[in-house]
Amino acid sequence: MIIGSISDSPIIRQLMADGKLEEARQIEGKWEAYLIAAVDHPFEGIERALVIAGSDARGTIFGIYTLSEWLGVSPWYWYSDVPVLVQEHIVLNVLVGEPIVEEGPDVKYRGIFINDEERTIDWAKEKFVTENGTPNVNFYRHVFELLLRLKCNVLWPAMHEGTTAFNKVTDENGFPVNAKEAAEYGVIMSASHCEMLLRNNVDEWEPWYEAHRNDYDWSGDNYKEAFDYTLNKEAILAYWKERLSANREFESILALGIRGVHDGKYAYKNLSETFGTEIAIMADVIQEQRKLIEEVYGRADAAPQVFIPYKEMGNLYNEGLKAFLPDDIMLMWAEDNYGYLRQVPNSEERSRFAGSGIYYHSSYWGSPKSYLWLNSIQLSLMVEQFRRAYDTGAGTYWILNVGDIKPGEIVLECFTKLSWDVTGQDDKKLESEFLKSYAMRNYHLSEADATTVAKVMDQYFRLCGTKRPEFFGTENPSSVHTTGFREELAFPFSVTGDGDEGQLLVEQCNWMLETLTTIYDKLDEQHQAALYQQLLHHVTSYLGVAEEYVYYWKNRLAAAQGRYTSAKIYAELSRKGRTRIQAAQDKFWELSDGKWRKAIGYSHPITYYGGVNEGIVLLGDDRYSNVSSPAWGAGAAAEGQKTAGVGTLRFHSRLKDVHYFDVFSRGKDKAEWVAEAERWIVLSASAGSTTAEERVKVTIDWSNLSISASGLIQVFNANNGKKAGEPIATFVVTATVSEVTFDGPSFIEANGYIALEAEHYSENRKGKDGSEWRPIKSNGSRGDTMKAFPDTAERVDNEFAKTAQLRYRIYFSSTGMFKGTFYRIPTLNEGFDDYGIPRSCRTAIGLDEVLPSRAQLDGQSSWGGRRWEENIMRMVESLEFSLTVQTPGWHDLVIYRSDASIVFSRIVIETEQGAVGDSLLGPIESPNNIAGDDEPRNRVAGLTRAICE
């Protein structure tokens, strides 16, 4: 084997000069490129050599680790305990023929931020015992190696309270030990959006302030008040310069600007007497920081620099600070902490010499709700948003906030592959290529089993795009022991509507768990560990949360409806969900002989900031409801109704739908019942007895109906199979017989609404302006979505005839003014366009050939506020509109692009008040011949076995 870099290895240069490694000229002078080749007779006495040549040192490292992966060493061999299989003989078929040439990454700087690392601290204190703080160099060595194996090159180190500052511990020569080790590995060090010039204020500012109390004329009563540039400019500049000098010899990216001592806004007590405006403060800070860099490094541009317009810094940037940022400073745009980019470059910003980047989260501590447990970002959303960033010019520097790294392995590797080869990764390849190959490599599965695991992975991440596991909750106080939650942001699944949406969620989670467990059980113990850490624990935990809350909601409903025994059973099932969560974590902590004890946690207690818990909301026993006293006989409740005894079940002949009602005991004893209905109404059971409850499915015998009809289902108490007394429930049944035939790819109104999935369009017209709508796979809460491309397209304000259109052919049997809802993925669009006009998130909608005069669907375009919080917690933005249909028959609903990058999942139009219901995901799609089934059917959940027994 011959390994070296073109820039430094005379052996590699000789091979090139001899014409034996001509392909190396393709990567010469490039950033982090490499080639791997089999070379015959490279030198005298060597018959054949395996050659790894890098364009530079890191390119060579990436070549080495690529070979390592070919040999069967997963990047996760240590960080997820993926076994390394010992092989006596290895054949590298990949090298038969032409050499492998990698011409370098698409994104120059790529890395991670270890943040909100309380779990890492607890784990590392036991795993890496040391007197030099936590986490220490022994921890970081594993992180450095992992980054390089994943072809990343940048690290933002841990920085919270309780963490030892990365640069704090020094060797005998005064060099920071961790930074020196990073340099040895070849990792570029930088720091977060609140750690300017490599300074960790949380752990470094107070001791520095105390050590220099006699050196400056300080203002402010304590170290926190003293960190104010308007009061103590000279001292703060000296503080920064000291760090620059200590780390001068190491490869770094320097963040510019100033924020608070921690992740908060900068102080400016003496603003009026010093700089006058906040923009002037920041402009002076950056100017002075550049002077420090010049003093230490020799030139103001000698080290890469970045300005991160995060939170309030973004507002400053858009209000005028950008005029004070030299062209050789990178801009790093932040998303809103929940996966939606706040801002992308306009054409002027794209032309900056240093380029732009993205700071993104797969884990976050903050309002409206933290998600620090399972790295629950939806993969397809992340890929789409990073592709948007790259296509708009933000492709120089990408950082992913990974929390504690574990258990976010799958998300992290998806990010690293995307940042290396942006154009080679997209939403359509996630399941079939990335997830499948990931499963084969890390769990050593057959192709068939890997395909199955990839389907489970895809389904899990879809659920994360519907409701993150951390977003289940109900009103709860905040303390170090309990997680704060606001009821108005709960957005629960319905346990009455659309087939019992909540129970369907539990069934879906059970399918994932059972499918995955079947494969897990076939593996030996060493392979089980990796699968459990990376996926099975996630799936088990999501099921636990779903059980806890779905059965909690069912408990409250049962108590309100008088389901005496059911209320008790559902409370117990909810508690079992809690137990499942704890058991899954206990197992995680026990894996690999306790190697990962305390490394993850559903609870995230934090003693500082007054004491909070940023984990999930676990329900106490006092949260459950009971029926105050038992009653005699049975009760019955229809689908979609919170009140027992009444309700309407709607059916349509083109849907062939199924609905249900529940019959329940109102007391401790078994309740007997019978039901009666017209002969065209089919009941799965017309009599029975239950101690708790049973579900009766309702369908229509369409062969007994020639015209639309209305009928009744009546439920009675019974004695020995015969009805007794008056009806305990009366449900109206409407059955619509439709003779309408589809008009090309089209939809038919049914059951009082039109519901259509975005990707099931009748016609997709490209715009004369070059814009178009394209599908995004496995995105949002219902599967696929449609997005307006290109991401750089100019906004259309009124000339909608020239822009991209999606047309949906619909048969309306109803007329009037109807309420519609456009379900938009809550992406953002801050800043100004090329003409200085504030950006927006707008879309236009029209009927038939009448062009809209404006874009009526105006989405939330900026970070913050109540509307943004609701969008984050519901994970979709519901934009309401009015639609007037004057005549029954065929019409075209038309969606016109206004802003670029708008993504939407579905449209629902309610033609009969109350028909749509209150479910989180909304009703089944209307009859159509586009989705691949001319007669779509809804699903009705079964009752859990505990209730049936």
Image (cartoon, helix red, strand yellow):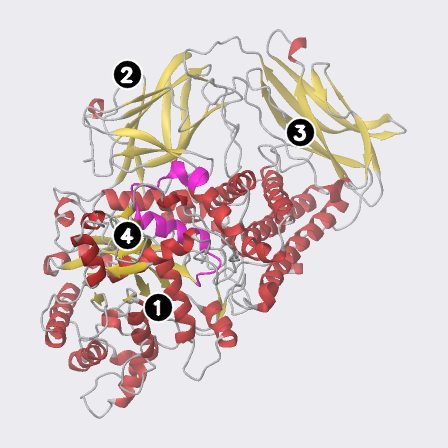
Provide the secondary structure element on which disc 2 rests.
loop
Which residue has dot 4 on it? Answer: 41
Question: Which mark's residue is nearer the viewer, 1 or 2?
Answer: 1
Label located before the other in sequence (4 or 1): 4
Q: Is residue 13 above or below residue 550?
A: below
Question: Helix, strand or loop at disc 3?
Answer: strand
User: Between 493 and 97, which is closer to the camera in this rendering?
Assistant: 97
Gap in Å between the C-alphas at discs 3 and 1?
54 Å
Q: Amino acid at mark 4?
A: His
The mark lying in front, picked from 4 and 1, is 4
Q: Within 10 Å of the Cα at label 1, are there few (<14), some (14-19), or many (20+) other Cα atoms?
A: many
Hey, what amino acid is under mark 2?
Glu
CA–CA distance between discs 4 and 1?
45 Å
Residues rendered magenta in the picture: 404-433
- Quarter occupied by residue 361: bottom left
Q: CA distance from mark 2 to mark 3?
A: 41 Å
Residue marked by disc 3: 660
Give how far apart the Cα atoms at labels 1 and 2 are: 57 Å
Query: Badge 2: few (under 14), some or many (20 or more) residues near its Cα, within 10 Å?
Result: few
User: Considering only order in the chain, which callout, 1 or 3, is on the residue closer to the N terminus?
Assistant: 1
Task: Out of 301 and 937, give the one closest to the viewer.
Answer: 301
Residue 304 included in the magenta stretch of the image: no
Q: Nearer the viewer, mark 2 or mark 4?
A: 4
Say which amino acid is labelled 3: Tyr
**Identity of the residue drawn at 42% across and 62% down:** 403
Q: Which residue is mark 2?
A: 849
Give residue 647's quadrant in the image: top right
